[in-house]
Structure formats: C-alpha cells, structure tokens
Amino acid sequence: MEWQTKVTVQPLPERFSYATRFFFAGSCFAIDIAQKMRDLHFLVSPDAFGTLFNPASIASSLERLEVPLFFEQAEVMHFPYGAYGSLNHHTSFSGEDADSFLAHANAQLKKASDFFLTADVVVITFGTAWTYTYQGKVVANCHKMPARFFNRDFLSPEKTAELMTPLLQRHHNKTWIMTVSPIRHWGDGAHGNQLSKASLLLAIERLQDSFPNVRYFPSYELVMDELRDYRYYAADMCHLGEETIRYILERFLEAAADEETRDLVKKMEKLNASLAHKPLFPKSEQNFIFSKKLEKQRAELLQTIGNKRKLC
C-alpha cells in the first residue's frame, strides 16, 4: 500500500554539475538549502543580507548587488534589542557597534556581488507576499521595532512579477529557479498564509510564461502534498526538520544535477557523516588511523571535484 502521494518533480532541461555557480536568495528555506550545498562543496554564493522573506526585498537586494551599491552610515540603525544593523538585513547580520556592522555588511556585499554577476543559476525562494513599509520603503526585517512604524501591504501576483521582470531581462543568460517556501508564516493566520503562498505561486507562473529561462521547483508541494505530517517539522511546527530539508535537497539534485554529480554527492555525504562522527576514544591509535584515512578520502574527493571544474 502506498502511504504517500508522490509529487512529480520535472527534470530541468539544463543539468548542473560541480562546476555550476549557484546564487541563493530568499527565505530561511533558501538559506538552509544553500548551506547544505556548501557542505557538499558546491560553488554557492556568500550571504549578503540574511533571510529575505518577500519578493520586494529580494528584488531590491539583487538590484543592489548589480551595481554594487554599498551601505552608508546613514542606513545604520540602533534597534530595540541593543544591536546595530539595517532594515535591508536580517537580524543575524546585526552587530554590537555601527562601524563593525557596516564593515561586515559591505564586505559581504562585495563578495556576493562578484558571485552574482558570474552565477550560472539563481535560486529564489519567496516566503510571503506580505510586506512591511517604513518611511515609504519596503524593509527586509522589522527588527522588533513597534508595529506603528510600519505599513503592511499585500503583493499581488502581477506586482511580484513586475518587480522581478527587470532583473530577468537584464540577466537572461542565467537560469532562474524559483520556488515557494513550505515554511508557514503563521502570524498571518492559516487563511492569510494560504493567500500569500497562492499569490507567490501565481506570480512564478506568470514569470514562467514570460521567460524561457525561469524554472519552478515544487518545494512547497513536496511538503504540503507529499510529506504532510508534523513529524517532518521542527519543534515550532512551522519550520522544517533537518531530515525534511535533506529530502528536499535530494529531490532538487535529482531534478537538476547530472548523474556523475549525484554520484559524487553520495560519496561526499558519506564522507561528511564519517567526519561528523564523535569517537569514544579520540586519542586511541585506531582513531588516529581512521582519521588519517578520512583525510586521504577527503583530499581525493575534493581533487576529483576540482578536476571536474577544470574540464568545464
């Protein structure tokens, strides 16, 4: 008996490899997948803003990377939780003083800008169609500031498509993979969350109809329709569990990576699991021999990946 309704993931026409340069932007789901791909030694962009939930913040951040437009002192704010940051960044970027935050933000911006301009694939994860505006500008995060400072607005599918269109036109040589985060924004309520996700899904459909280089990956459907059980969630019952993220990455690589790359991924996953193992007797001769063996395997595997990149 089948206990799941399996979601079909259409293979991408372009097959990617370890030579492919992946740029990720968007909700915490994108951040999680990007980190797992870094752990597997894919070429993945550095993070310049942290979690970006809505399409307006994602679009403005990518536009900033195009220039690049560095942050200035006037954009730095002191937030209620006692740290300095900007309304363009997630709280994880905030620092103890304005100067250190600004230096770090601009250093990351430069690295991410260089990567974005040369990226082969841009993976965008939209989290919510709801936006918050401060003094006429959509913010990436409210940083625990009082709600009265912000106006709350809903992005229609047409508006989201309008925001993304100029970027897609300017970077038509890249493959854009878009997805909707399966992480629920429960603060909007059950119905509000569904309206938000529906708006984002319709926006991606419009962009696919307009641009041949836009692909859709059904991460939302994989969780909502295939997994559909709270055991796949983290303790807050909104974010995803570790194994769920791994499963979605596995389905993504099945659809996007070539066979040789998937074989290398399996070897890297096995190696990473061995490296993460905590021995009972770390100072023993047996553990010393085992560690040396893993170091050799790691060097050989990274050399294989490096050689694949040189051939591309």
Image (spheres, rainbow, N blue to C red):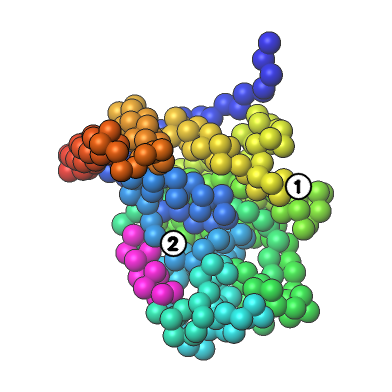
Quadrant of the image occupied by residue 229: top right
Residue located beneath label 1 in the image: 194
Occupied quadrant, residue 108: bottom left
Image position, residue 177 (x, y; %): 48, 45
Please tell me how crowded label 2 is: few (under 14), some (14-19), or many (20+) other residues with Cα within 10 Å. some
Q: Amino acid at mark 1?
A: Gln
Name the residue at 28% across, 33% down.
Answer: 286
**Whether residue 290 is visible:** no
Type of the residue with mark 2: Asp
Q: Is residue 160 left or right of residue 279?
A: right
**Is residue 111 on the magenta stretch?**
yes
Residue at the (33%, 28%) spot, across then down: 263
Question: Which residue sits at x=67%, y=56%?
Answer: 128
The residue identified by callout 2 is 47
Could you tell whether 149 is left or right of 127 in the image?
A: right
Q: Position of residue 284 (x, y in %)?
A: 29, 38
Task: Count the labels in the image.
Answer: 2
Question: Which portion, as a residue range, is magenta?
Answer: 104-115
Q: Element under label 1?
A: helix
Give residue 253's quadrant in the image. Answer: top left
Residue ranking furthest to the bottom: 74
On-image quarter of the N terminus: top right
For residue 75, which numbered disc appears in the image? none
Residue 93 versus residue 3 in the image, above or below: below
Most common SS among magenta residues: helix
Residue 190 forms part of the magenta stretch: no
Q: Nearer the viewer, residue 281 or 53?
A: 281
Tell me the mark number nearer the camera, choosing from 2 and 1: 2
